[in-house]
Amino acid sequence: LAVPDFAGLVGDVHRMYREILPVRSGAVADYIPQLARVNPEQFAISLCTVDGQRTSVGDDDVPFCVQSVSKTVSYCLALEEHGVDLTHGHVGREPSGQSFNELTLNRQGRPHNPMINAGAIMCCSLIRPELAPADRFDHVARTWQRLAGGRRTGFNNAVYLSERQTADRNFALGYSMRENRAFPNGTNLQETLEFYFQCCSVELDARMLSVVAGTLAAGGVCPLTGDRVFSEETVQHCLSLMATCGMYDFSGEFAFTVGLPAKSGVSGAMMIVIPQLMGICVWSPRLDELGNSVRGIEFCRKLVAEYQVHPHAAM
Ligand code: GLN
């Protein structure tokens, strides 16, 4: 068993949930009404080990949109389709040191990495570009479903429409990349941005996202179904970039204090991977100034304080 004393872990997770529940600092994202209206009190922690043991507490069946957590899956899909060299001819792999939607490219005129908006838009342009938009989205949705152990993910159309309506910054990023000839030949910018907003609007609950994280922890094989969704190499690259770039401009501080590959989204979702051991989802909508879930970060602090999960811990 990956976690021999699973009952002990379950008890600890439930206790941490109760300890973190009173934390009410931060504020929900309000750049679109659909996120501003989400009940900020909601909180869920779910985990899934690499051998399929699961536990879950709180609002673990309430759907939320993945938002920036989608950047992990879009990057993996680009890698699976094109390999490392071609993919990284279009997107860098260096932390940007700036916020997720900063209007900036690297010295080659490419997005800094796949975990910020510009890089995720670039990855979307690389996913099945020859297919019709509906089939490209189907490909992404089917991949999420396989990662989540076979349960169909949802789609929040209101979030999608809102994202598309208030997209000036993402369009600016898109035009800036096009000006630098960063996209593959023949890329349709409007279509690519719409595809990116659709990827952000995929909906699932904490239980499902913990299985996705568990699949990454297991090197790309879903712990519930045994389905190999991504190659080990793809997952290794994704985890490397999550570890260095996954938490916006808190990524360096997060790598120092927690050290685990993780990815956050403005919906308050957070996916944490303990390689070869388990995947964890924490979801709680109130965000700190940098856009990370306050309770999500708090959970990670507790996790490393109580368990030796920091990859560079000597013990
Ligand atoms: N979908 C939003 C955007 O592209 C937010 C992404 C995120 O979670 N940071 O701006």
Image (cartoon, grey):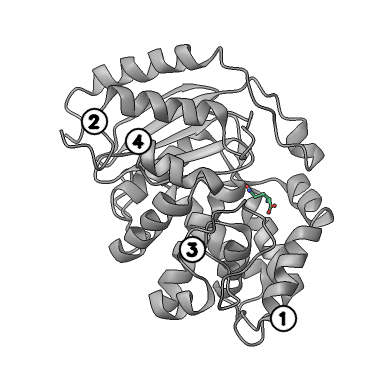
Q: Position of residue 99 (x, y in %)?
A: 62, 51
| Residue beneath disc 3 | 75
Under tag 3, what secondary structure?
helix
Q: Position of residue 33 (x, y in %)?
A: 81, 38
Q: Marks 4 and 3: CB-CB under 8 Å?
A: no
Q: Which of marks 1 and 4 is nearer the N terminus?
A: 4
- Rounded to the nearest angstrom, the CA distance separating label 2 from label 1 is 47 Å
Disc 4, ligand 1: is the CB inside 8 Å? Answer: no
| Residue beneath disc 1 | 179
Q: Residue 48 carries which label?
A: 4
| Residue beneath disc 2 | 308
- Rounded to the nearest angstrom, the CA distance separating label 1 from label 3 is 22 Å
Q: Which of marks 2 and 1 is nearer the N terminus?
A: 1
Please indicate, yes or no, whether residue 301 appears anywhere in the rendered image: yes
Please tell me which residue lies in front, 260 or 35.
260
- Rounded to the nearest angstrom, the CA distance separating label 1 from label 4 is 43 Å
Q: Closer to the observer: label 1 or label 3?
A: 1
User: Relative to residue 315, is residue 116 depicted above or below?
Assistant: below
Task: Tell me what residue is drawn at x 63 percent, y 64 percent.
Answer: 118
